[in-house]
Image (cartoon, grey):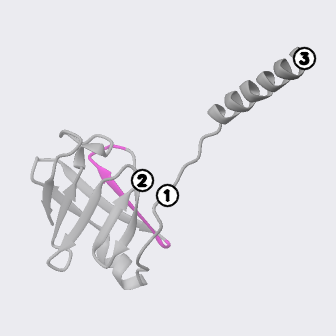
Amino acid sequence: MKTLIAALAATLTLGAAHAADVMVQVKPTPGYHLNQQELNDLEQSFALSNGQTLKVTTDMTRIFVQVGRGSWVEIFPVAKDRFKSNAGTEFEFRDDNETVAIANFGLLPMAKAPARAMVLARR
């Protein structure tokens, strides 16, 4: 009986240790599919209200943003003019892509703002 309990305890411990080593990354599921013209219209630079610059570029069907010289971050469409990053930054393009409102701006690399800050940008 002691052997059975020891074996069971070892199995549970090993399973828990193994589960802690496994990491799953979940990406937002695109809620909207952009056509090629909509993708092309997004490619531009914006002057942010905090003095920084936001660049938007596309690669085939993927969309990336960059703040200053920070690393590129992929964003995913959730509606026609709304996008979201894996970290939770939200983008809303307005006025035929002349302006963009960015929620949770501080979650982007090189962003000079608190994590939950909201900034506006103009072309």
**Magenta-drawn stretch contains 122:** no
Q: Which mark is residue 27?
A: 1
Instruction: Classify mark 2: residues with Cα within 10 Å, few (<14), some (14-19) or many (20+).
Output: some
Q: Secondary structure at mark 2?
A: loop
Nearer to us in this view, 15 or 92: 15
Instruction: Classify mark 3: residues with Cα within 10 Å, few (<14), some (14-19) or many (20+).
Output: few
Residue 45 in which image quadrant: bottom left
For the point 28% across and 49% down, the residue is: 67
- Separation of marks 2 and 3 at Cα, in angstroms: 47 Å
Question: Where does residue 39 sit, x and y in percent of width and height?
Answer: 37, 76
Discs 2/3, front: 3
Q: Disc 1 residue type?
A: Lys
Q: Disc 2 residue type?
A: Asn
Nearer to us in this view, 45 or 103: 103
Q: Which residues are magenta?
A: 60-70
Q: Disc 1 vs disc 3: Cβ atoms closer than 8 Å?
A: no
- Separation of marks 1 and 2 at Cα, in angstroms: 6 Å
Q: Earlier in the sequence, mark 1 or mark 3?
A: 3
For the point 58% across and 47% down, the residue is: 24
Q: Disc 1 vs disc 2: Cβ atoms closer than 8 Å?
A: yes
Residue designated by label 3: 3
Q: Earlier in the sequence, mark 1 or mark 2?
A: 1
Q: Which mark is residue 61?
A: none
Q: Secondary structure at mark 3?
A: helix
Residue designated by label 2: 86
Nearer to us in this view, 31 or 49: 31
